[in-house]
Amino acid sequence: MSRSGNGGVRRIEPGSFIDPMFQKSYHWVNNRNAFVVFLALVAVPVGLMALHGSLRNHGCALQNNAVHNMRSLPILVITYREAYGTYPPSLAALGPPPSGQPSSTEAAGYIDPKLASGNYIGYFFHYTLKKPLHNGDSPAGYVIVADPIVDDPGRHHYYVSEDAIVRSEERRPATAESPQSNEDSCVCW
């Protein structure tokens, strides 16, 4: 009960205080602006969190590709060497020949053209031949390194040579002294 300004007692009906509040909030919910506020306060942050997780997992997928390629490339280099009697002069030599042309020492057709370009699925691949032990000899071997295009935390750099042992480092270039990679793939949770 409450007192009115004239000293009399005014009776408050049950729910009369709640009903005007409810009506205002109901009107606010039916308003289009409420939808915009909902998007700004709830849907957008949830979407951004999902996008962040998706991008992090995308990085994992890129790393999985790099690991796979670093394990496959030594086999393909040896296949090339067996076929042509020498190490390939470049990654491009492992790539596909021009349309309608047979495979050759310049384009053996073993790898995807993008990988042959050295820029493949989030990583730069660099192939170099080791210097011959003696003048006039064939190269003493090769080195392949894969460095992430974007060096985010958790991304690895890879190294492999003719011994076919993939080595990796996090956040710095891998070398022959780097630890052996135990990655078959990365785990993304």
Image (cartoon, grey):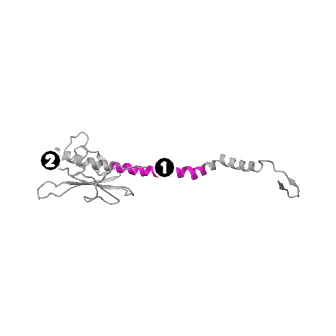
Which label was assigned to residue 97?
A: none
Q: Mark number for residue 85?
A: 2
User: Residue 15's x, y, as percent?
Assistant: 76, 47
In what element is the residue under mark 1? Answer: helix
**Label 1: how many Cα within 10 Å (few below 14, some 14–19, many 20+):** few
Which residue sits at x=65%, y=47%?
29
Amino acid type, mark 2: Gly
- The spot of residue 2 in percent (x, y) is 83, 55
Residue 127: % across, % down: 24, 54
Marks 2, 1: nearer the viewer: 1
* Residue beneath disc 1: 50
In the rendered structure, the answer to whether residue 54 lies left or right of residue 34 reads left
Residue 147 covered by magenta stretch: no
- Residue type at mark 1 is Ala
Upstream in sequence: badge 2 or badge 1? 1
- Horizontal and vertical percent position of residue 117: 28, 50
